[in-house]
Amino acid sequence: MSKLTPRVFIIRHATGEALIGEEKLICTSLLAHIYVSPRLRAKRTLELLGLFEKCPRLCEQSAETDQLVEWDYGDYEGLTSPEIREHRRTNGLVGDRPWDIWRDGCVGGESPEDVERRCDALIKTIREQWHGPAMHDGNVPGDVVCVAHGHLLRAFAMRWVGKSISNSTVPLILEAGGVGILSYEHHSIDKPAILLGGSFVVKAENHKSS
């Protein structure tokens, strides 16, 4: 195996299997491990990806982890943004700036610091258990898949490159069904990076004229 820089694919629930395969974005032979949120939507997405059918060895290389559970919205669970603003006004929490989950967190739920700690713990595990060994020995797979949720995965991406989620000035979007890629510059585990574009092969289909 050539010396490839290992990656983390962060997948928001609702992704299908079109990106999975030996000549596709997520190459099964390069996968070392799968982490998935225990929430039903994330587990269903992992099932629909078809990874275990395409690569049976991954059945023993996957784990549910609470570190990927969506941000705990606490008292704001199920509320719209206007309802959250009203809730905060009623409880005397209105300040000079409008509520922002990244800065203010959720009453009765998680703060940005709580979410950062969860992300940091999983990032540490990935680097020590999978990416470090893969960089040292090019003969072992190193790619990791994380299947989870919108707010959590955006926080994960920011923490991947060492940015505080409460002070970041770079807004990130990960749509339902979206895939983000995290890796490293110069094949160095000390230089984590967000991979903006990856190359992969899409086979052309042959169409017969009627």
Image: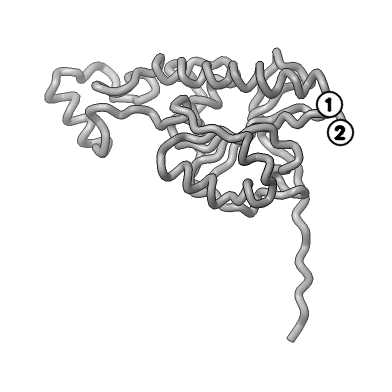
Nearer to us in this view, 30 or 191:
30
Q: Amino acid at mark 2?
A: Met
Q: Residue at x 46, y 19 (%)?
A: 118
46 over 141 or under it: above or below:
below
Q: Which residue is most to the bottom? A: 210
Mark 1 burial class by Cα count in 10 Å: few <14, some 14-19, many 20+: some
**Residue for badge 1:** 138
Q: In terms of sequence position, does the residue under pointer 2 or pointer 1 come before the other?
A: 2
**Residue for badge 2:** 1
Residue 55, image x, y percentages? 69, 46
Nearer to us in this view, 73 or 84:
73
171 over 191 or under it: above or below:
below
Residue 69 figure quarter: top left
71 over 178 or under it: above or below:
above
| SS assignment at label 2 | loop
Q: Residue at x 64, y 31 (%)?
A: 8
Q: How many numbered marks have been drawn onto this rendered protein structure?
A: 2
